[in-house]
Image (cartoon, helix red, strand yellow):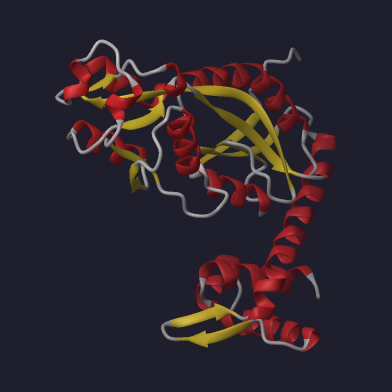
Amino acid sequence: MDMDQISAFVAISRLKSFSRAADALHRSQPAISRRIDLLNQELGAPLFERVKGGIALSDAGTTLLPYAEAALAAASDGVAAVRALQKAETGHLSIALVGTLANEAFTAMLRRFRRRHPGVEIGLQTATSQEVSDLVRRGEATLGLRYLADSGSGLVSQTVTRENLVVVASAAHPLAKRRTLRANQLAGQKWVAFRTGTPRESFIRFLNRTLAAAGLDEPEVVAIDSLTAQKRLVEANFGIALLAESGVADELRRGTLRKLKVPAALRTSIPVTVIHRRGAYLSPAARAFLSVLSGRPQ
């Protein structure tokens, strides 16, 4: 098993197509097919199977995939480690983050980093918390910023700050006119929240625990897959939401959303963590970014 075979296998599994993988790797399709044939022979089991509309990973392919991704990521680490010996203050740093964390505090921190390390090229991509973890686990991002810790294997999580959460409603909502609210006045309200996705994607669980602590058990939760959709639905008086304060700052200033004065049990915050692969090589640029992110002097 060599790196070309592993690269072909991972590319096909992501792109769901031999031809698209060949294009991505700048190889001919017969060459890609040959690499997979050799892998199948070496492992004694087919890695892909034909399904309606294309291909899918077999049981053997599903088992191999995380190890193949880890091997590619480790190889990338090795290349970065060697290059860092020659380029201590230059290079590329890839970061994945939840879109709502690209707020004023993050952009200010990013400006500080770029002033101190102008030779470092930063690549940013946004995703959900679970997707951020997946990108880091596969080596497609060196660092990730997400809500809540990821307890999955292979990752190191460190809390760097906490985001204040606020309960918001439409300016037309009856509760928006109340000076202060008791917990029982929130009973029966419809809550708009992010979709869970997987057991580790736990914002709705976090919401449910927070509401339960305030005595609001089994709330009606409408699962939404984007912050923008959440805010628009709340503005349309479809429900209320518990959201990061920085993510609704513009709407609060414009008055399209109102912050409700809720009981102390609902005035909470959510941890923001930085993650990287356990045992991964962290370049000088990555370590410098972690220092700026955590507020440590350099």
Q: How many marks?
A: 0
In this picture, is 30 found above or below 274? Answer: below
Judge left or right: residue 119 versus residue 54: right
Judge left or right: residue 2 versus residue 256: right
Q: Residue at x 77, y 89 (%)?
A: 44
Which quarter of the rendering shows the C terminus? top right
In this picture, is 100 found above or below 47? Answer: above
- Asked which quadrant contains residue 230, the reply is top left
- Asked which quadrant contains residue 42, the reply is bottom right
Q: Residue at x 44, y 16 (%)?
A: 264
Percent position of residue 214, x then y: 43, 27
> Furthest-left residue in view?
172
Percent position of residue 279, x then y: 82, 45
In this picture, is 40 found above or below 169? Answer: below
Q: Which residue is drawn at 30% across and 28% down?
A: 186
* The one of 39 and 101 positioned closer to us in this rendering: 101
Judge left or right: residue 253 versus residue 133: left
Percent position of residue 239, x then y: 24, 36
Which quarter of the rendering shows the N terminus? bottom right
Judge left or right: residue 162 versus residue 43: left
Q: Is residue 26 visible?
A: no
* The one of 289 and 79 positioned closer to us in this rendering: 289
* The one of 42 and 67 positioned closer to us in this rendering: 67
- Asked which quadrant contains residue 226, the reply is top left
Percent position of residue 257, x then y: 24, 23
Q: Can residue 240 be seen in this view?
A: yes
